[in-house]
Structures are given as C-alpha cells and as structure tokens.
Image: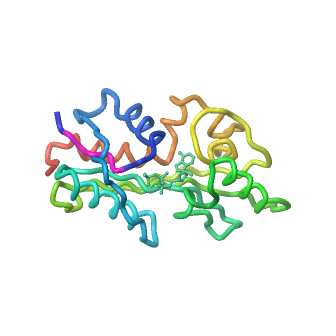
C-alpha cells in the first residue's frame, strides 16, 4: 500500500479525506511528523497548497498531499479567501465576523475552494487539482455537522447549509471531494508516476 503524508494540522480535513478515499484507492494517509509548521505566505490557494505539500515531503521524506482551502464571498471581494483560517481567532468569531460583514448585503453568492497538490518525496509536483462548491451566505447559522464556515454556507440547489447535510452528502459535493476525486483518479491511473 502506498504511504502518503497528508500535509495538514486540521483534523476535520483528515476525517473528510479518509471518508472520501475509503475503498477508493490503495493509499495509507499518515499525518506529518512533529515540527510540521509550513509558512503559508503564498498569494493563492494553489501556492499555499504547494508550500504545505513540499514542506511535508521535506520533513518526512515521503510523498505528500496538501489541501489549501477557504471561503470566497463575492460581495467581500473574495474575502476571507486564503485568510479563511485566520479571519478571526475562533471558529465562532469567524462566523460572527462574516455575518456582520454581510449585514444588509443582498448579493450573498460565495464559493468554497480547495486546491490540492500531490508531490513526490523529492517535492516535485505530480498532480494538482482544484475543487469548487458554490452557494450563498445564510443570514443565520444552522446545522451541526462539518466544521468551519459550514453552518452559514447554503449549498446551491438545496435549502440547506453544508452543516445540515450529512457527512456522506457533504463528501459527495464539497470542494474537497471534487478536488480529491481528481487526485484519486490520477493515483489510480496506470501511468501514475508516483
Ligand atoms: P492546514 O493548513 O493545517 O491544512 P487550516 O485549517 O489552517 O489547516 P487552511 O489554511 O487551508 O487550513 O484554511 C482552511 C480554512 O477554510 C478552514 O480553517 C476553514 O475555516 C475554511 N474551510 C475550508 N474547508 C472548509 C469546509 O469544508 N467547511 C467549512 N470551512 C472550511
């Protein structure tokens, strides 16, 4: 079985990755060794994803997969975007800040974006993919599943927030699932150079 480091410190991402990959690819995902602390100073999701993957490969000596993701809100010029994790100190405060910024705003269009990058043990890029999930910012929060901004993100084509969907439903339509789907296809392809 292939062993790949999943370059994250976010346990929710790992949980979703494992659920999405279950029975789909012959890979054991392991967490990065202690000391994994990449400097995410890129200007795009793609750049930060590459930084995390290369740092994980460097300190582990193994191939690595990274997920850089976030919420982009049209009316806020794409914010919080790549700063989603640092928009405010706690998850609750991040949601409060977002709802406050959206008070009185009619255009509530938003999207979740996930940039995944797979590198080999030397840090060379093997595959990079983007997944997007479109929706709208709710006026209040609802739902208890998922994490982060899920309780205020109403998924297009439904009347539900991401946090009201079951894990199984989220993992079919999320930005993370859509990016990972393509990575899995690449890992499973005959000519995978990994
Ligand atoms: P790592 O960098 O260690 O992977 P992180 O949480 O800091 O963990 P990011 O820099 O990629 O990761 O920031 C992602 C943030 O975007 C995350 O903390 C959430 O606030 C938000 N986010 C990403 N995916 C999400 C999802 O599926 N549901 C809700 N919020 C999400």
Q: Where is 26 relative to 131, above or below?
A: above
Left or right position of 190 against 71: left
Q: Which stretch did the figure color magenta?
A: 3-7
Q: Where is 20 relative to 150, above or below?
A: above
Name the quadrant containing residue 190: top left
17 inside magenta stretch: no
Left or right position of 47 against 174: left
- Residue 188 percent across, percent down from the top left: 22, 40
Q: Where is 169 relative to 32, above or below?
A: above
- Residue 31 percent across, percent down from the top left: 31, 42
Q: Measuring 53% from the left and 56% from the top, which residue is drawn there?
A: 70
Helix, strand or loop for the magenta stretch, by majority: strand
Q: Measuring 52% from the left and 64% from the top, which residue is drawn there?
A: 82
Left or right position of 57 against 136: left
Between 133 and 140, the residue placed more toward the observer is 140
- Residue 77 percent across, percent down from the top left: 65, 70
Q: Residue furthest right?
A: 104
Q: Where is 97 relative to 182, above or below?
A: below
């Amino acid at each position: 079985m292939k062993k790949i480091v999943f370059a994250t410190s976010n346990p929710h991402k790992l949980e979703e990755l494992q659920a999405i990959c279950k029975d789909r690819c012959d890979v054991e995902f392991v967490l990065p060794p202690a000391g994994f602390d990449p400097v995410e100073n890129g200007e795009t999701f793609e750049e930060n994803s590459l930084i995390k993957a290369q740092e994980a490969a460097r300190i582990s000596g193994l191939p690595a997969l990274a997920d850089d993701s976030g919420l982009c809100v049209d009316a806020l010029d794409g914010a919080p975007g790549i700063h989603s994790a640092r928009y405010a100190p706690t998850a609750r405060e991040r949601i409060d800040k977002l709802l406050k910024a959206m008070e009185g705003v009619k255009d509530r269009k938003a999207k979740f974006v996930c940039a995944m990058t797979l590198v080999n043990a030397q840090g060379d890029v093997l595959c990079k993919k983007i997944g997007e999930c479109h929706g709208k910012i709710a006026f209040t929060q609802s739902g208890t599943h998922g994490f982060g901004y899920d309780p205020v993100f109403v998924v297009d084509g439904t009347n539900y927030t991401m946090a009201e969907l079951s894990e199984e439903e989220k993992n079919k339509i999320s930005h993370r699932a859509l990016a990972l789907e393509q990575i899995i296809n690449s890992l499973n392809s005959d000519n995978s150079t990994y």
